[in-house]
Image (cartoon, rainbow, N blue to C red):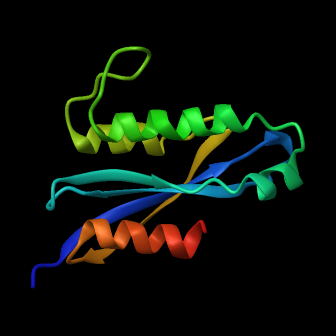
């Protein structure tokens, strides 16, 4: 069995930045050795509305979709042009002041990056 090192980041919806309250809404997993960069999302609308009744759920979902597109290497239409998965992961994990923000980067080892991404989504977001 081959173990691949990986890094992951939890994506957070932060309705009001000044309050520093957030709800986890997604995970991005990157493994250079496995040539794997993907994101997964699960938006709990009720939890988000509990923090901010007027949050724009469509904007949160659009941001998460944009991150999925960047993971896939899509460019244009306002997406960054980044050649490698490592560069794209760096762009995703860069601090920002938007409604969807990355948390700290963590790491581990896996023999199946997709399974690990699914498990992280279940454990940290759902």
Would residue 103 be seen by someone viewing this image from the given angle?
yes
Coordinates of residue 58 in the picture (x, y in percent): 67, 33
Q: Quadrant of the C terminus?
A: bottom right
Residue depicted at 20% across the width and 30% down the height: 83
In this rendering, position of residue 66 left or right of residue 36: right
Which image quadrant is residue 125 in? Answer: bottom right
Q: Which residue is more in the foreground, 66 or 11? A: 66
Coordinates of residue 43 in the picture (x, y in percent): 63, 53
Coordinates of residue 119 in the picture (x, y in percent): 43, 75
Q: Quadrant of the N terminus?
A: bottom left
In this rendering, position of residue 62 left or right of residue 14: left
Coordinates of residue 79 in the picture (x, y in percent): 40, 22
| Vertical comparison of 119 with 70: above or below | below
Furthest residue in direction left, as rendered: 1
Residue depicted at 37% across the width and 34% down the height: 69
Would residue 98 be seen by someone viewing this image from the given angle?
no
| Vertical comparison of 12 with 64: above or below | below
How many numbered circles are shown?
0
Residue depicted at 56% across the width and 32% down the height: 62
Furthest residue in direction top, as rendered: 77
């Amino acid at each position: 069995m081959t173990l691949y090192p990986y890094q992951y980041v939890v994506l957070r919806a932060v309705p009001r930045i000044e309050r520093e309250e957030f709800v986890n809404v997604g995970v991005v997993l990157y493994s250079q050795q496995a040539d794997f960069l993907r994101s997964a999302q699960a938006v709990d609308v009720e939890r988000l509305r509990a923090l901010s009744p007027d949050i724009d759920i469509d904007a949160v979902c659009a941001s998460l979709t944009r991150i999925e597109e960047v993971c896939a290497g899509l460019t244009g239409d306002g997406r960054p042009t980044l050649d490698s998965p490592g560069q794209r992961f760096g762009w995703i994990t860069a601090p920002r002041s938007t409604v969807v923000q990355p948390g700290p980067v963590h790491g581990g080892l896996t023999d199946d990056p997709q399974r690990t991404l699914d498990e992280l989504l279940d454990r940290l977001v759902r």
